[in-house]
Image (tube, rainbow, N blue to C red):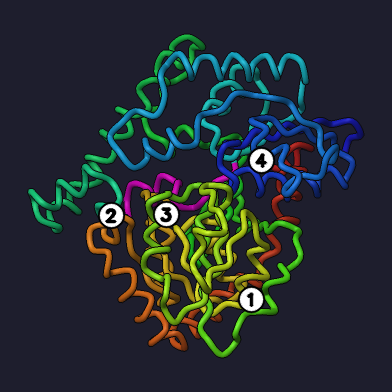
């Protein structure tokens, strides 16, 4: 290491999972003597449940509204205007000019892939395997969380919709990335019309196992390190001692990108049932004590790893962090995906028979589906648990945080070509 080297982490700061896996790696690099700065919105980067006050250097940057971004993923709307994108790039360029970092690390903050190249700052990209081009364009059927493929299935039938989906997906991407074209033109960069082309850095870390995120052979500037898993450093709540261990316990978590209607559906479905329900809201809904059903235990944040270790089943949205927390605990998962990225997580759980996979569209259309699926989960719990144990054994082979930090350090110091 060369003393004094500076690294800026700029994740998609409105989404907790992107923030926390950068934090985990950044802390290791700070311990090794690098100057680490985190840039983005304060929502998570200044949350004392996630970052200790004064622990890390912080640089404020505007970022996309999380609700708008999630709505764009789940609908035909463009996520942002070209004016917003250009403003974000200008703010990032101002940051580069002021901080003069030796390296930038981005976790799906799309404008960083433009500004880092304009500023000529080497860029490390943190990615999930399913966003690599070979998978994104070659292995998936038409999803069930977006109105366009759903309409295709109604009109064309599933088989023809699946066959046509890749071409339609490329058209959707070109439409949604079109507000970026002004930035490519302004800064004399080659236009990127597809997300897998845009999110690649000079060096890339893949945060998946090969079982849940198969990649095949990778170029030298890609390193598959396994999932960087984070859980808040919180003790188990006092009410844990009140749980009846003879009755089934379900842990419900939707990360930071769940949907309020899905939370309500879980409430309505499981209230008064035989299940005890633990729920982490991530601050997405606020509930007074009077609104909390009997046998529900609700907190804003919970130590997910500890919760999953004491529960029989987790209901989640299929996010990368949550799925791998379930794998790490060996806890079967019922995934209810709300957008395409979460569908991939749910499909992998289902493919390995480590749980079940639904979508929010299907659950909202048939409210009884969730209750039937939960009951089915517990009927086959031993089968799902055995398969989760197989995934857990595979996960244990990885040392993701150290490998990710080593990869960044080696790239920064010229040991990766």
Q: Quadrant of residue 229?
A: bottom right
Q: What residue is rendered at 28% in x and 34% in y? A: 76
The crowding category of the residue bearing disc 1, from other C-alpha atoms within 10 Å (few below 14, some 14 to 19, many at least 20), is some
Quadrant (top left, top right, bottom left, bottom right) of the C terminus:
top right
> Is residue 16 shown left or right of residue 6?
left
Give how far across and how far down residue 209 sits, in percent.
Answer: 55, 63
CA distance separating discs 2 and 3: 13 Å
In this view, the residue farthest toward the front is 290
Which mark is nearer the camera, 2 or 3?
2
Say if mark 4 contacts mark 1, CB within 8 Å.
Answer: no
| Stretch of the chain drawn in magenta | 126-139
Quadrant (top left, top right, bottom left, bottom right) of the N terminus:
top right
CA distance separating discs 1 and 2: 29 Å
Q: Earlier in the sequence, mark 4 or mark 1?
A: 4
* Element carrying mark 1: helix
* Element carrying mark 3: helix
The crowding category of the residue bearing disc 2, from other C-alpha atoms within 10 Å (few below 14, some 14 to 19, many at least 20), is some
The crowding category of the residue bearing disc 4, from other C-alpha atoms within 10 Å (few below 14, some 14 to 19, many at least 20), is some
Q: What residue is rendered at 42% in x and 16% in y? A: 82
Q: Is residue 309 magenta?
A: no
Q: Nearer the viewer, residue 212 or 324?
A: 324
Q: In the rendered image, which residue does mark 3 sit on?
A: 342
Q: Quadrant of residue 362?
A: bottom left
Count of all numbered marks drawn on residues in the image = 4
Q: What residue is rendered at 47% in x and 78% in y? A: 275
Q: In the rendered image, which residue does mark 1 sit on?
A: 309
* Element carrying mark 2: helix
Q: Earlier in the sequence, mark 1 or mark 3?
A: 1
Residue 361 tag number:
2
Which mark is nearer the camera, 4 or 3?
4
Residue 44 tag number:
4
Q: Nearer the viewer, residue 147 or 190?
A: 147
């Amino acid at each position: 290491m060369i003393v004094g080297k500076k690294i800026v982490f700029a994740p998609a700061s409105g989404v907790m999972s992107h923030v926390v896996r950068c934090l985990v790696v950044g802390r290791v690099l700070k311990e090794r003597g690098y100057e680490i700065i985190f840039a983005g919105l304060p929502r998570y980067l200044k949350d004392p449940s996630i970052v200790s006050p004064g622990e890390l250097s912080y640089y404020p940057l505007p970022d996309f509204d999380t609700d708008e971004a999630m709505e764009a993923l789940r609908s035909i709307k463009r996520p942002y205007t070209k004016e917003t994108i250009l403003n974000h790039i200008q703010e990032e360029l101002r940051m580069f000019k002021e901080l003069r970092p030796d390296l930038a690390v981005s976790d799906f903050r799309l404008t960083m892939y433009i500004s880092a190249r304009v500023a000529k700052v080497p860029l490390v990209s943190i990615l999930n395997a399913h966003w690599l081009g070979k998978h994104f364009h070659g292995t998936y059927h038409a999803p069930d969380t977006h109105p366009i493929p759903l309409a295709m299935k109604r009109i064309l039938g599933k088989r023809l919709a699946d066959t046509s989906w890749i071409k339609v997906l490329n058209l959707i991407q070109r439409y949604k990335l079109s507000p970026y074209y002004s930035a490519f033109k302004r800064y004399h960069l080659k236009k990127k019309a597809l997300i897998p082309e845009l999110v690649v850095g000079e060096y890339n870390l893949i945060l998946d196992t090969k079982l849940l995120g198969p990649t095949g052979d990778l170029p030298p500037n890609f390193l598959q390190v396994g999932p960087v898993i984070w859980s808040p450093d919180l003790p188990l709540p006092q009410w844990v001692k009140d749980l009846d261990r003879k009755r089934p316990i379900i842990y419900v978590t939707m990360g930071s990108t769940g949907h309020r209607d899905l939370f309500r559906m879980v409430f309505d479905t499981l209230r008064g049932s035989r299940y005890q329900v633990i729920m982490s809201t991530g601050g997405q809904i606020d509930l007074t004590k009077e609104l909390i059903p009997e046998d529900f235990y609700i907190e804003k944040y919970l130590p997910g790893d500890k919760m999953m270790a004491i529960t029989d089943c987790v209901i989640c949205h299929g996010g990368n962090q949550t799925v791998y927390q379930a794998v790490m605990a060996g806890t079967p998962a019922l995934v209810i995906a709300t957008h395409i990225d979460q569908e991939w997580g749910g499909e992998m759980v289902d493919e390995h028979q480590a749980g079940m996979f639904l979508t929010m569209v299907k659950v909202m259309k048939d409210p009884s589906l969730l209750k039937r699926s939960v009951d089915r989960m517990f009927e086959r719990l031993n089968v799902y648990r055995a398969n989760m144990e197989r995934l857990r054994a595979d996960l244990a082979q990885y040392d993701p945080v150290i490998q990710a930090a080593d990869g960044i350090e080696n790239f920064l110091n010229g040991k990766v070509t």
